[in-house]
């Protein structure tokens, strides 16, 4: 009456692989533009954090600049923010974002 019969569309059998190629291409581009550089950055940060020594001037993730006065253990350092007032802060090593000056070196 008012309902017309539905017919299945005839599709090509080889289109499955053709549709998969753009998806793989996008994944490869994302890997080289996003994932790989981020992995390199994480590895560099891990090496920098493991090489922290007493006397290094560092910048923390919160923007605090200070000198490392003591390396407590594998996970924690003590940073002196003000030498006149002897203000010291305990900090987790991974929160150090960069080393300004290594101990014994001057810029």
Image (spheres, rainbow, N blue to C red):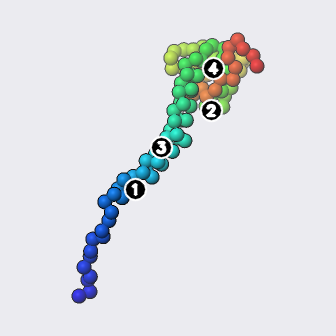
Q: Mark 1 highlights which residue?
A: 19
Is label 4 or label 3 in front? 3
How far, Cα to Cα, is label 2 from label 1?
Answer: 46 Å
Q: Tag count in the figure?
A: 4
Query: For residue 12, which quarter of the picture?
Result: bottom left
62 versus 17 height, above or below: above
Report if residue 87 is visible in the image.
Answer: no
- Which dot marks residue 79? 4
Tell me the residue that label 2 is attached to. Answer: 62
Q: CA distance from mark 1 to mark 3?
A: 15 Å
Residue drawn at 75 percent across, 16 percent down: 106
Q: What residue lies at 26% left-to-right and 86% top-to-bottom? A: 2
**What secondary structure is marked by label 4?**
strand
Between discs 4 and 3, the one toward the N terminus = 3
C-alpha distance separating marks 1 and 4: 56 Å
Q: Residue at x 42, y 51 (%)?
A: 21
14 sits to left or right of 99 = left
Residue 52 placement: quadrant? top right
Q: Are marks 4 and 3 in contact (CB under 8 Å)?
A: no
Which disc number belongs to residue 105? Answer: none
């Amino acid at each position: 009456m008012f309902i017309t019969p539905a017919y299945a569309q005839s599709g090509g059998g080889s289109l499955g692989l053709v549709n998969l190629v753009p998806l793989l291409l996008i994944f490869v581009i994302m890997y080289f533009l996003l994932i790989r550089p981020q992995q390199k950055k994480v590895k560099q940060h891990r090496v920098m954090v493991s090489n922290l020594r007493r006397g290094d001037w560092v910048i923390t993730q919160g923007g605090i600049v200070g000198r490392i006065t003591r390396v407590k253990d594998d996970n924690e350092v003590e940073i002196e923010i003000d030498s006149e007032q002897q203000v010291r802060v305990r900090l987790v090593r991974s929160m150090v974002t960069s080393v300004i000056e290594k101990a014994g070196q001057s810029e």
